[in-house]
Amino acid sequence: MSREKAYKKLNEVFQDVFDDESITVNDATTADDIEDWDSLEHINLVVAVEKMFGIKFNMGEVNNMKNVGEMMDIILQRIKE
Amino acid sequence: MNRYTYEQLYLGQKEEFYVEVTEEMLQDFRRISGDVNPLHNDEAFARQHHYPQRVVYGMLTASFLSTLAGVYLPGENSLIQSVETKFLKPVYIGDKLIVSGVVAELHDSVQQIILKVSITKPDGQRVLKGVMKLGVLR
């Protein structure tokens, strides 16, 4: 899957989790850019991303992602595995 | 109190307990919540609206979900993250309820479990169903 195509799916997840169809994310997006992105919504987001892409993050990855770009890197890596 | 760790939990795991709703519980709930709505407090009003007696607060019934998570499944390590419920049938003072939950999903990366919950009367009539998202403390 291309990064561009994966971002289309990832945007759907963000829009659904944060109930805001205007959200679009990119490599540089962080929790500071989305008002409702707190620790609880992070959990909901991680679970929703796992379901959308059929992948599993590990606990360290969940706690250490600095931006959406790092999340996307892991998603694309898992899809290949 | 149960003390399940995340690693001890599994899909399909079930816990349940029994509770009887009392007049004192309604009084305590009214005192804590400030909900003085007559459907829960005025026999005549309840009958006027075709209920045989005062209806127990739905949120009082739902409060037993707190016990389900915090005492039974997973117990001590519970952190309630969200609760969605539907109130299916009225509950009355003196009703005995079976409060149960089943682990429907496990999300390892965030140590979260999804519990499908239901509250039923002994005759099998379901009065509440719902879904709880629970974190499991490390």
Image (tube, coloured by chain):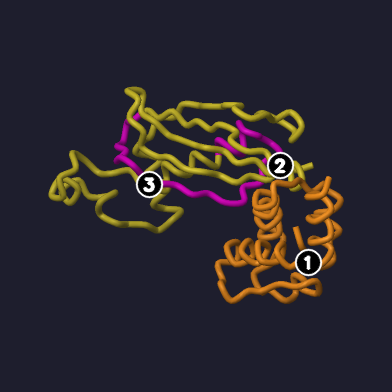
Chain colours: A orange, B yellow
Spatial CA distance of label 1 from label 3 is 41 Å
Q: Is residue B42 left or right of residue B135?
A: left
Q: Residue furthest top?
A: B123
Residue B49, placed above or below residue A18: above
Q: Which residue is mark 1?
A: A68
Spatial CA distance of label 1 from label 2 is 25 Å
Q: Is residue B102 magenta?
A: no
Closer to the chain start, of discs 2 and 3, is 3
Q: Which residue is mark 2?
A: B136
The kind of residue tagged 2 is: Val
**Label 2 near label 1: C-beta < 8 Å?**
no
Residue B64, placed above or below residue A19: above
Marks 1 and 2: which is nearer the front?
1
**Label 3 near label 1: C-beta < 8 Å?**
no
| Quadrant (top left/top right/bottom left/bottom right) for the C terminus of chain B | top right
In this rendered view, identify the residue nearer to me: B31 or B91.
B91
Task: Give, as a single range, the part of the protein colored magenta.
Answer: B67-95
Name the residue at 74% across, 47% down.
Answer: A55
Marks 1 and 3: which is nearer the front?
1
In this rendered view, identify the residue nearer to me: A54 or B9.
A54
Crowding near the residue tagged with mark 3, few <14, some 14–19, many ≥20 C-alpha atoms within 10 Å: some
Q: Chain of mark 1?
A: A
Q: Which residue is mark 3?
A: B58
Q: Is residue B82 magenta?
A: yes
Measured from the top left, where is residue B104 in percent x and y? 58, 35
Q: Is residue A75 left or right of residue B82?
A: right
Measured from the top left, where is residue B29 in percent x and y? 42, 48
How many dots with numbers?
3
Name the residue at 25% across, 44% down.
Answer: B54
